[in-house]
Every structure is written in C-alpha cells, then in structure tokens.
Amino acid sequence: MRRRPHISGLFLILALLLSPLADARAEEAPETDAESDTETQAEELEEELTRRDRPLRPFISLNLHNYYRPLYPEVPGLSTNVLWVRTLANTGPVLFRLSVPIRSAHPPDETLSGLGNSNLLILARLTRAASRVSVLLGPVYQMPTATDPRLGKRKHDLGAATVVIGARKGALVGALASYQHSVAGDPDVRPNSLSTFQPLVFLQLERGYYLRSTAITVVQYNERTFHLPVGLGAGKLIPVGRTLVNLFLEPQMTVASKGERQPAFHVYAGINFLFTPPDKVQDGKQPTPIARRRAMARQVLLSSL
C-alpha cells in the first residue's frame, strides 16, 4: 500500500510532548509576592511596551511550515505535501524573508518529490516606529530552484508585496498581499501571473495559548483559476531560555475555487523559533515578567509570516 506523508502529524506529536514541559516550567517559576505587589507598575510598563515596542521590532526566526492536502475532488487518489523552510530577519526598518519549499505529490500511479521554486521577500517599513499600525512595502522575487518541472515552473518572477499589521494588547490583526509576474525563464513555459492575499489574525489566550486564522487566497490570472480557503486554528508559545517556540495547527477548508487540481482542504501545521533581544523601556527600567511575556508573545506571533 502506498504511504502518504504525515509531516503535520509529527508537529502534533511534538506539540503534545512539549506542552507539559512548558507547564512544568511555569510551575517551577511562580510569580513572587513582589510581582503581585507591583501589578499597577506592570500594567504601566505594558502600556509603555505597547507604545514603544511595536510589532516590527528587530528579530530573527527560523520557521517550518507544512501544508498537507489529502483530497482533490477532481483527481481521485491525489494527495500533496509542501514543507516550507523559512527564515525571517527584521532589522526594524527592513524585513527579509527567504522561503524554500520541499514538495511531494502522490498521484495514483507514482510519487514525485523534490525542491520547488524559492522566493525572497524584502519589505521596507513606511510608517513611523511609534505608529500603532505598521505598513510595509517591497519587492518579491521567485527563483526557479525546482528540481523537476512538475514541482515548479522554470521562470523568474518579480512582483511586489505589502503588509499592514497592528497589535493591541492580546490581539494582532493584519494582512499580507502580493502580486508577481514572470519576467524571464523557459520561453516554452506559460508565464506566471498571480496574486495572493493572507489575513493575519491572532488572539492571545491564557498560559501561552492563542487562536489564529491565516489561510491564503491565490488568484492565477493566466490560468483563470482561484482558490479561497478559510482557516481557524490554535497554537502554543513555549519559552526556552531566550528563545520562544511557537507550535500551531490550523485546519483550512476551501469555500470557493475555480479550475482543476484544487484541494478540498489543507492541514496547516508549523513550528517557529524566534530569537529576539531583551525588552527595554525608557529611563533604564526593565519590564516586569508579566509585561515582558506579553511583548514577546506579540513578536512570536508576527514571526509566523
């Protein structure tokens, strides 16, 4: 019997294994009486962090994002899997994201796997650092790194992307939109012409848990196709030293589509590792553990891009 990829299942197992570890760490380091006595100060520092430490402060992250698509209604027996290996580096004024996909397809009569086309995103911040809403704009470059023509077109694409994002206490809301078009490559291959739209909605809960919705809509103009999914999932933030680990699972259902080979649903799972400098506020004050955890949580959610 043919075996299908279940990489997303590995993320679930990892989440179950690490969640007790996070709870144990929380029990080993309970809040002291001094922290309780300074609750008012903590809230004041939280407001200061919210004002000064906007969502796009410097950080570096390494992300593994996996999309498993087990059902294609028009192609019985087909399943696909894409593991995106992503690294993000934010300097403050500029955000860099490099994404490399490892693709596999399992048609009824064969198995195909290898690298897909990689892409580089460079976004410059257009708003002031103190702005409550951050707006970024910049170029997108997709490079033909696919190891097989069936895993990616041998085309060089250029385009533009924009991100609008804002954070307010326990919520982070925004969107990522992009457009790209083929400018060079194999002349015998039809050029790409597509746009994407991704909502970025995160709602923080207690004990490091949060809800999320980030399903990507894709419109391909030259193929005259589109795919519109809607997702709702949950995640867990786990501090490990000065690194924050973000585990999440987000099922995504297709609500509208046009064209062949459109999946009925996705199983989207991932793990992010966020490395960020310590938080500071004005006058040399250090934030309390309460304020620091909240500020760092906003950062690890943003690193999910």
Image (cartoon, grey):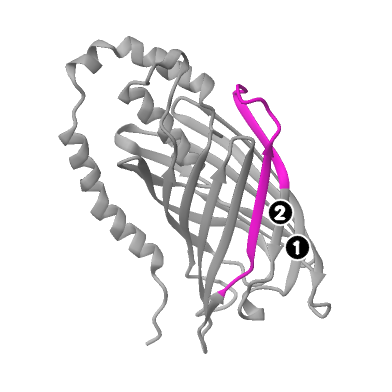
In this rendering, the count of numbered labels is: 2
Q: Secondary structure at mark 1?
A: strand
User: Which is more N-terminal, label 1 or label 2?
Assistant: 2
Residue type of the residue flagged with mark 1: Asp
Q: Is residue 272 visible?
A: yes
133 or 74: nearer the viewer: 133
Residue 135 spot, x, y in % from top left: 67, 34
Residue 256 spot, x, y in % from top left: 63, 56
Q: Residue furthest front?
A: 284
Q: Residues within 10 Å of mark 1 (few under 14, many from 20)?
A: many
Q: Which label number is shown at residue 260?
A: none
Q: Mark 2 to mark 1: distance in Å?
A: 8 Å
Q: Residue furthest bottom?
A: 109
Q: Quadrant of residue 226?
A: bottom right
Please tell me whether residue 162 is drawn above or below residue 11 in the rendered image.
above
Residue 29 spot, x, y in % from top left: 19, 32
Give me the residue at 18% from left, 28% from top.
30
Q: Secondary structure at mark 2?
A: strand
Residue 33 spot, x, y in % from top left: 18, 16
On the rendered structure, is 279 left or right of 197? left
Residue on which the image places disc 2: 140
Give me the residue at 30% from left, 57% from top.
14
222 or 84: nearer the viewer: 84
Residue 195 forms part of the magenta stretch: no
Q: Which label number is shown at residue 157?
A: 1
On the rendered structure, is 52 left or right of 191? left
Give the magenta range. Answer: 115-138
Q: Residue furthest left?
A: 28
